[in-house]
């Protein structure tokens, strides 16, 4: 007996928290098929083609009598994080974390007031932060946290996330997740999918909140990462963060990160920007049935509207590729009845 | 039924609640308790202290009323592969694969007949292969497979494993696993542990057989790895293996690999050599209850006897550390009623 059965059940259990918080699935699924099917698994979605495409795909690959059946072990779904599972405006949450960290560490680094990009970050120049991009942020996080143990870094990030607030929405960052996407993740897990986050953001940062926020355990988080070194410190072994980047899990780095961490090709992938193009290409060229979707930020009133010209979450090449390859477009304004979870 | 069976009964009873709490096997619960508890989970183990230590630990961490209870999500167990889960004499299976690959590729590389270590490998110099060690083998595999796609490599390894035979035992390599360790893995999974392989061997090689042989899916395999590059080839995206090593998952590289892939500390770790020392240190210095064991190769008649002076699977420093830290020693000759699975 492989892990599969256990895994699916454990995933479903973990997902209970976010789903219940949203008022969905509170009636326990102890009683099976009938009642479960009677509950709408995607209540925050309007009755739209994107919703139908997701449900149709899941139905096809879980129908063990059909020719598109995919065994549970191969039901791997990967999700980008920033802009796909949670809000990335006005800047990536990890960029905001970086700004706050650099401010906190600045007294020990007087040279930063004269050195770019630290100077711009210290004065809160949002354009400079945005210009740094995924690579710049990943490198800066690595540089500014070099010498710290992984445990201390996790504690620092956890403390920051407990209080830091998105300035546009006035919610803690972990409350700026997209309710419809939380529902998709839970729905997939109920159908024996294993859900992974594959993000340009830092794995060590993501792992602090992915389990409580998304029901995704640390071992299912793939992200950018700095190198670490094992060493004894005061007689106890620790892992020390080094300044060098180990993996930039963005663009062509995403299939690389997927291969490294997961070792098999996803059959579903969700993204929202050009940084997800290669992941979606990789997921949709395997021999199994496959599905890809792009979350399109079209809702200026409830969230934000941006695509081909945006500095954050630019969606240009991937939007063109979606038309070519028949990927599903999720139009946030049209498709989602609700954006954020109820507080 | 022996004392063993009675003890297993009590343990199964104690562990039942947390397993259900985790949602594991909930739908199947109805049919069980009785029969399941009556089955000895470790039938190939003699009634010895190492067996008792494993069962006691699992009972403690799954007793949700006890102070040592560990939530299912944190029940991570890591297993070295060569010498811990399967046989590593007369040489690592992957070294044998490498020798065969180099022979197959030699016609295209006439210079290999004059270049070390290729020359020694081509003439089947076992000492030279052993001397290459984990690092040498990982580097050579990377070097000899550069330019190949990950899919082609997997196919090559799969074909090799389907027929290649361990020359000492006359069994295919995948049949040279240790039956008592297969039972430990299954027993842990029944108790809601997630089992990972953390090996100095190549992840891409291990993933070809880990699922069918051990019930460990690719995403729970951590191993040494070469770098890969994403690129389009004939219009389809592929991952190309590059000659550079990305991670040497051995010694201090094991906690690094664990952090990178799992992102949290194991509470159980099993190894057999000095290459596992740092993994066992890492697993046994967390805040949770923890357990570490070394498989000691003491059985010259049924398998092999080696430790402090061995070229393959040297167990010297780690054996000393085991005494210091109170790690469990599994004496293969004394503790295991059976070595290999029935064919």
Image (cartoon, coloured by chain):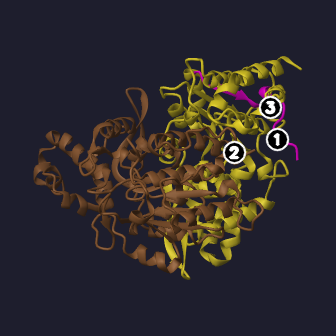
Chain colours: A brown, B yellow
- Indicate the secondary structure of the residue bearing disc 2: helix
For residue A267, side relative to residue B158 (left or right):
left
Q: Quadrant of residue B37?
A: top right
Frontmost of labels 3 and 2 is 3
Is A317 above or below relative to A214? below
Residue B335 on the magenta segment: yes
**Residue A194 in view:** no
In magenta segment, residue A66: no
Q: CA distance from mark 1 to mark 2?
A: 26 Å
Q: Do the residues indicated by labels 3 and 2 lie within the same chain of the protein? A: no
Please identify the quarter of the rendering in which residue A127 is found: bottom left
- Residue B32 image label: 3
Q: Position of residue A183 (x, y in %)?
A: 51, 51
Q: Residue at x 26, y 49 (%)?
A: A96
State which chain disc 1 sits on.
B
| Circle number at residue A5 | 2
- Select label 3 or label 1 by which is in front: 3
CA neighbours of label 3 inside 10 A, class few (<14), some (14 to 19), many (20+): few
Q: Residues within 10 Å of mark 1 (few under 14, many from 20)?
A: many
Q: Chain of mark 3?
A: B
Image coordinates of residue A310 in percent, x first then y, are 28, 69
Element assignment for label 3: loop
In the figure, A300 relative to B336: above or below?
A: below
Magenta residues? B326-343
Which residue bears the numbered disc 1?
B340
Give the spatial CA distance, label 3 vs label 2: 16 Å
């Amino acid at each position: 007996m492989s892990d599969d059965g256990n895994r699916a059940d454990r995933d479903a259990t973990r997902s209970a928290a976010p789903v219940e918080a949203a008022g969905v699935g509170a009636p326990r699924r102890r009683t099976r098929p009938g009642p479960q099917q009677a509950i709408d698994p995607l209540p925050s979605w309007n009755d739209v083609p994107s919703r139908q495409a997701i449900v149709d795909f899941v139905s096809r690959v879980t129908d063990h009598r059909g020719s598109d059946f995919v065994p549970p072990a191969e039901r791997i779904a990967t999700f980008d994080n920033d802009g796909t599972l949670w809000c990335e405006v006005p800047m990536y949450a990890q960029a905001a974390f970086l700004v706050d960290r650099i401010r906190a560490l600045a007294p020990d680094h007087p040279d930063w007031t004269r050195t770019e990009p630290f100077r711009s970050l210290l004065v809160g120049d949002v354009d400079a932060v945005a210009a740094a991009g995924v690579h710049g942020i990943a490198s800066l996080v690595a540089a500014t946290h070099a010498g710290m143990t992984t445990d201390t870094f996790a504690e620092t990030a956890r403390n920051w996330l407990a209080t830091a607030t998105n300035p546009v929405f006035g919610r803690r960052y972990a409350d700026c997740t997209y309710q419809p996407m939380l529902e998709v993740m839970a729905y997939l897990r109920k159908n024996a999918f294993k859900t992974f986050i594959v993000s340009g953001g830092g794995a060590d940062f993501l792992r602090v909140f992915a389990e409580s926020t998304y029901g995704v355990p640390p071992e299912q988080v793939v992200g950018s990462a700095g190198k670490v070194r094992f060493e004894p410190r005061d007689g106890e072994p620790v892992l020390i963060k080094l300044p060098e980047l180990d993996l930039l899990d963005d663009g062509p780095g995403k299939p690389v990160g997927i291969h490294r961490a997961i070792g098999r090709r996803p059959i579903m992938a969700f993204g929202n920007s050009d940084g997800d193009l290669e992941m979606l290409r990789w997921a949709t060229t395997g021999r199994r049935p496959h599905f890809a979707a792009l979350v399109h930020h079209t809702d200026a009133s409830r969230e934000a509207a941006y695509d081909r010209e945006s500095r954050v979450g630019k969606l240009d090449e991937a939007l063109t590729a979606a038309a070519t390859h028949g990927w599903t477009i999720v139009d946030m304004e049209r498709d989602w009845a609700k954006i954020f979870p109820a507080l």
